[in-house]
Image (tube, helix red, strand yellow):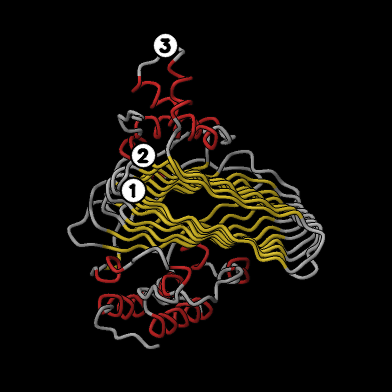
Amino acid sequence: MTQTLTRYQQYEIDYKAFSESNAQPEWVQSLRQSGWARFQELGLPTARRGNEPWKYTNIAPIAEASLKLAQMPGRITLDEVKAVAPWDDGWTNMVFVDGIYVSDLSSGASSGVAVTSLAEAIATNDELVRAKLGQAPHMEEDDGFVSLNNAFLRDGAVLHIREGKTAERPVHLLFISTATEQATVSYPRILVVGEANSKATIIESYVGLSDSVYLTNAMTEITLAPGAELEHYRLLIESENAFHVGYARVEQAADSVYKSKVFERNVGLGRFDIYTRLNGEYSSCEMKGLYYTSGSQHMDNYININHEKPHGISRLYYKGILDGRSRAVFGGTVYVQPGAIKTDSHQEDKNLVLSPNAEVDSKPALFIWADDVVCGHGATAGNIDEDTVFYIRTRGLDLEAASRLLIYGFAGEIIEAVEEKGLRNYLEQLFLESLPSYKFEF
């Protein structure tokens, strides 16, 4: 159904100015134009009745906000960056401010992987980008946010891991939003291509510098050739008033390995939508996540794993901690297609609810059209039981210290799975400082 443009007038104004001022190769213009045309048809997914993917998340605050396209990046120093974001001088760091690559804040290079800004790749009409961008699975889905990201395609990162090579350093893609008087929107885009038998680690971070209202509409496309391995970390540390809608689309060939670890601590209204297609025999994926919501925050994780070939393995394990009047949503769906025999899949979502006013909606699901598979799922939500608290207090801890230790122990299982030491230390500190002064009362 065609949406009225009254609500989306700012997008229309910005798209017209953006199109006129950004002469690009024909294939880029085509992607932008098709994205805008699709958005005009779809609008944003404000209707939730009959719209299962958005059933538990109301994006009316985003649709009703007048969000102007972020222009020139705000001025910040490297010291300011290091004060708020994960950072290691041993990483390859690419810094984007308000959606634009800033070379002066970026540093490091890594053998085995070619790292460039998307704007540069477009300007040089890069052959790899031309062939791969916009080709990830489910890019054609009916989603207005995806359409907008295509329409305002401008900058981001391109990672190309060469055949048989191992990136010697993690590649950190840091997206920072600065303070502005006008509510803004940026559209980061990431393209990762792992050739056969390659291996790399990427860290994707989204950080807010102020309590300004803004939207980050981010898209990551990943293609893994046979035998490729990718460790993918994603951190969400936006402002309390920020909106964040992120997507990841992953295509996996035979024997490829994809590991995703997601950490979500701060955002007003957030959603992360990840889809991976295991499109080759013996391909595997492991997805772990930890989210902590407080105040009136809302965080939605929407995860789909599609097994299309035999002998695939998938593991999905998310944990949430909810406090205040916050709300979390977990939707995890595994599809086992006809012929995908010997699939081994399990998913689980566990939630620790600290407040009677907090709420979690958890919906794991399996759709199986093949025989000879091993699949299972589960979900839990609740508080710590009295016996557990009593046991930990017999070690000489007062109630508050015991409660804090138990909460961190719940989260620690996911944090300890982080293989990159510098990042693990950062996350430990981030979540330790975030934990509430709480006492388990019975």
Q: Is residue 162 visible in this depiction of the protein?
A: no
Q: Amino acid at mark 3?
A: Gly
Q: Is residue 329 visible in this depiction of the protein?
A: yes
Callout 1 touching callout 2 (CB < 8 Å): yes
Res 385 → quadrant: top left
For the residue pair 238 and 118, the one nearer the viewer reads as: 238
Quadrant of the image for the N terminus? Answer: bottom left
Q: Please give the name of the residue rendered at 36% of the width and 45% of the height, measured from the top-left corner.
A: 293
For the residue pair 435 and 71, the one nearer the viewer reads as: 435
How far apart in space, not on screen, are marks 1 and 2 (Cα)?
7 Å
**As drawn, is 128 to the left or to the right of 171?**
right
**As drawn, is 371 to the left or to the right of 331?**
right
Quadrant of the image for the C terminus? Answer: top left
In this picture, is 261 found above or below 1? Answer: above
Q: Earlier in the sequence, mark 2 or mark 3?
A: 2
Task: Report the residue marked by disc 2.
Answer: 354
How far apart in space, not on screen, are marks 2 and 3 (Cα)?
23 Å
Task: Report the residue marked by disc 1.
Answer: 358
Task: Report the residue marked by disc 3.
Answer: 396
Q: Total of numbered circles in the picture?
A: 3
For the residue pair 244 and 24, the one nearer the viewer reads as: 244
